[in-house]
Image (cartoon, grey):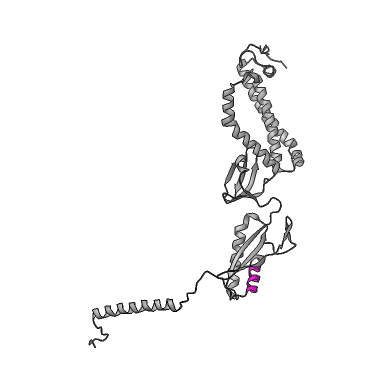
């Protein structure tokens, strides 16, 4: 096998400008394998392409070889993805430094004035650095994790956390859309996490029944209407939330005796936090069908008007005035007869 023509490439002299002169050692090594001569500028371009390709292959290979071990070590999807991204960034940074060496660039050759640097930091870099710092705090505090269902209280919008990076948090909403929120603003929001520790969520429903209704029967019907829904927990041991314990089965309480009826409050637990509205609708649908044949009636705001002697006298005076006006109109129109002869 013929070794081919080898370029006689010397080392870059200290006085040679960036990008000029002879190619670097890496370029010389690469073109030495070619069976033909090549222009030094084209050799640098070829070397750059090869370095980028090797960096891409190396990043994928490292992730494939060590991805599972990293995931077992961190045990959190967000930290695992962040570590893998850091490995990729490190490989590409090494590739970038190699490419700079190919073109004869040095770190000390890339300099800017203090004023320009301060402007860049103040206008561009500062928000980015703030988002990165917020991302570090989010990963450390663990307010939510990838896969959790969260709600943005200020927007009244629910969704699943799709990804957490050092710069932003990506949420896949229940309306089939993406929300990409910078971590700097995400830390200032009120975020409700429905599935951080326990995906079970407690809901409540207020039902107002009349005083004439059978209250005990109304409470039983309300509890049964919730128990017959599929994703509602029908019973079992009490559910512990912090230091408190709550009944797992649907329970209807007498909340208060209101102006228009007795307010009953149903509290029940659902197993799927992304179907809260559907579960609530099914409970109310079942309840509406159950009270039709029961001694239970829904109350609604209504008023009874009672007139005493003063208000009655006022009403009689108005009635007399109306009668006088009717009689005056009758006299002005003349007598009327209902038969054909006018009698």
Residue 57 in the image: above or below residue 103 = below
List x then y, in percent, for residue 237.
75, 62
Residue under the image location 65 percent in, 73 percent down: 216
Q: Nearer the viewer, residue 319 or 49?
A: 319
Q: Residue furthest front?
A: 310
Observer-nearest residue: 267 or 92? 267
Instruction: Say which of 320 and 254 sits in front.
Output: 320
Where residue 264 appears, as percent x and y from the top left, is 62, 68
Residue 281: x percent and y percent? Answer: 59, 62
**Residue drawn at point x = 50 percent, y = 72 percent:** 303
Q: Is residue 84 magenta?
A: no
* Part of the protein shown in magenta: 212-224
Residue 159 placement (x, y as % from top left): 61, 49
Q: What residue is drawn where x is 59% and y is 72%?
A: 291
Image height of 143 relative to 120, above or below: below
| Location of residue 10 by image quarter | top right
Q: Quadrant of the N terminus?
A: top right
- Place residue 78 in its image quadrant: top right
For the point 24% across and 79% down, the residue is: 332
Q: Nearer the viewer, residue 154 or 307?
A: 307
Which secondary structure is most common in the magenta stretch?
Answer: helix
Q: From this viewpoint, is residue 201 visible? A: yes
Against 343, residue 275 (above or below) is above
């Amino acid at each position: 096998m013929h070794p081919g023509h080898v370029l006689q490439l010397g080392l870059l002299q200290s006085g040679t400008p960036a990008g000029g002169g002879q190619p670097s050692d890496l370029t010389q090594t690469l073109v030495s394998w070619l069976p033909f001569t090549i222009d030094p500028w084209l050799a640098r371009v070829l070397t750059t392409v090869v370095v980028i390709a090797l960096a891409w292959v190396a990043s994928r290979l490292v992730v494939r070889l060590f991805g599972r071990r990293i995931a077992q070590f961190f045990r959190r999807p967000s930290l695992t993805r962040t570590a893998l991204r850091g490995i990729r960034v490190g490989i590409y940074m090494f590739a970038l430094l190699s490419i700079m060496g190919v073109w004869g660039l040095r770190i000390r050759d890339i300099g800017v004035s203090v004023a320009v640097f301060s402007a860049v930091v103040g206008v561009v870099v500062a928000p980015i650095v703030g988002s990165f710092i917020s991302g570090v705090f989010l990963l450390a505090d663990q307010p939510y994790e990838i896969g959790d269902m969260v709600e943005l209280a200020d927007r009244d919008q629910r969704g699943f956390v799709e990804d957490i990076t050092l710069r932003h948090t990506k949420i896949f909403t229940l309306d089939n859309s993406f929300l990409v929120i910078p971590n700097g603003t995400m830390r200032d929001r009120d975020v409700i996490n429905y599935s951080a520790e326990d995906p079970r969520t407690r809901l409540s429903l207020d039902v107002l029944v009349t005083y004439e209704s059978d209250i005990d029967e109304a409470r039983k019907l309300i509890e049964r209407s919730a128990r017959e829904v599929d994703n509602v927990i029908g019973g079992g041991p009490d559910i512990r939330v912090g230091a408190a314990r709550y009944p797992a089965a649907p329970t209807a309480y007498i909340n208060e005796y209101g102006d228009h009826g007795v307010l009953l409050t149903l509290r029940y637990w659902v197993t799927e936090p992304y179907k809260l509205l559907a579960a609530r609708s099914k409970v109310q649908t079942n309840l509406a069908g159950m009270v039709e044949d029961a001694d239970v009636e829904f109350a609604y705001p209504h008023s009874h008007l009672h007139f005493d002697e003063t208000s009655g006298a006022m009403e009689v005076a108005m009635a007399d005035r109306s009668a006088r006006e009717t009689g005056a109109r009758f006299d002005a129109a003349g007598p009327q007869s209902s038969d054909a002869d006018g009698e």
